[in-house]
Amino acid sequence: MTKAKYIIKPRATEKSIVAADKNKYVFNVAKTANKDNLAQEIKLTYKVTPLKINIVNSPSKAVMRKGKPGVKSGFKKAIITLKKGDKIDIM
């Protein structure tokens, strides 16, 4: 298995685990990732073909911590939909 360039890690949340039952897998991805790059990387890394890829870009936000201003870092995530029968073993 080669080092993933665009996929950082799978997102293990309640919502993403429920989505895995519907053949949708959620990953944190690099800020530079796009749908074409992710499709190629999914094919090479997990040996499955994605039907659809949705990308959500969550921007950074200003926060206050103990009265001091700070920044909550943003992230980019991808929701990969696979055809029936295909699975990705994440856990």
Image (tube, rainbow, N blue to C red):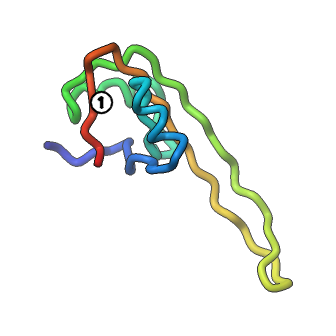
Residue furthest toward the right? 67
Side (left or right) of 81 relative to 3: right
Task: Give residue 7's quadrant in the image.
Answer: top left
Side (left or right) of 26 relative to 43: right
What is the three-letter code of the residue carrying label 1? Ile
Looking at the picture, how far across and down is residue 66, in whole percent?
A: 80, 85
Q: Please state which of residues 49 and 24 is positioned toward the viewer in this rendering.
A: 24
Figure disc tally: 1
* Residue displayed at 22% across by 48% down: 3
* Residue displayed at 60% across by 35% down: 56
Q: How many residues crowd mark 1 within 10 Å: few (<14), some (14–19), many (20+)?
A: some
* Residue displayed at 39% across by 50% down: 8
Q: Please state which of residues 22 and 35 is positioned toward the viewer in this rendering.
A: 22
Indicate the secondary structure of the residue bearing disc 1: helix
Residue furthest toward the left? 1
Figure check: 30 above or below 72? above
Figure check: 55 above or below 52? below
Q: Please state which of residues 11 and 28 is positioned toward the viewer in this rendering.
A: 11
* Residue displayed at 85% across by 84% down: 67
Q: Please state which of residues 25 and 17 is positioned toward the viewer in this rendering.
A: 17
Pick the quarter of the image with the N terminus: top left
Looking at the picture, how far across and down is residue 42, in whole percent?
A: 30, 30
Looking at the picture, how far across and down is residue 33, in whole percent?
A: 46, 37
Figure check: 48 above or below 15? above
Side (left or right) of 50 relative to 86: right
Residue of label 1: 42
